[in-house]
Image (cartoon, grey):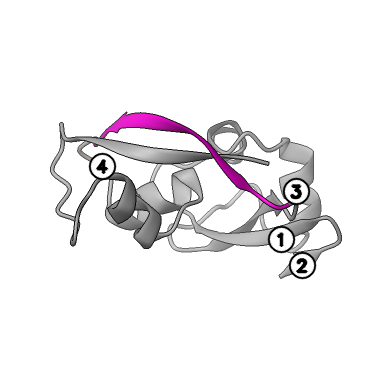
Amino acid sequence: MNFGEYTCMNYAIRQGDTLYGISRDYNVPLPLILRLNPFMDIYNLQVGDEICIPVQQQAAEVGNVISYTVEEQDSLQSILDKFGIGLDDLLEYNGLNEVMLMPGTTIQVPSYDV
């Protein structure tokens, strides 16, 4: 979806998620998440519900590389979503042909300057 200066990144609600926590994790103001998800029941988030996390549409350039240690609850998709990267980028920055993420593994994640 496109909301003017923002593009929507779909995020599936997970067990224990709160809107405040999601806004903090993605560095997006809570009022903006609320504005872009007008039909969301903020008092009754359900696991699996999808919401829009706004991402600015400006061109992104690779900046720094971040070291990230895989945690027990991480999945490949959650890491890609958390950092807003694609699988190809993750493979390239780690010199891999395929991804097998075990908790405790440190990976390199490109940081995009927007």
Q: Quadrant of residue 102?
A: top left
Q: Which residues are magenta?
A: 59-70
Q: Amino acid at mark 1?
A: Thr
Which numbered tag is attached to residue 73? Answer: 4
Q: Is residue 14 visible to the viewer in this orientation of the structure?
A: no
Can you identify the residue that label 2 sits on?
Answer: 2
In the rendered structure, does residue 46 fall within the stretch colored magenta?
no
Which numbered tag is attached to residue 7? Answer: 1
Can you identify the residue that label 3 sits on?
Answer: 34
Q: Is residue 24 visible to the viewer in this orientation of the structure?
A: yes
Closer to us: mark 2 or mark 4?
Answer: 2
Q: Amino acid at mark 4?
A: Gln
Residue situated in front as seen by the camera: 31 or 16: 31
Q: Earlier in the sequence, mark 2 or mark 3?
A: 2
Location of residue 42 in the rendering, given as x and y in whole percent from the top left corner: 66, 49
Location of residue 82 in the rendering, given as x and y in whole percent from the top left corner: 46, 45
Q: Earlier in the sequence, mark 3 or mark 1?
A: 1
Q: Earlier in the sequence, mark 1 or mark 4?
A: 1
Quadrant location of the N terminus in the rendered image = bottom right
**Whole-Å distance between the Cαs marked 3 and 1?**
15 Å
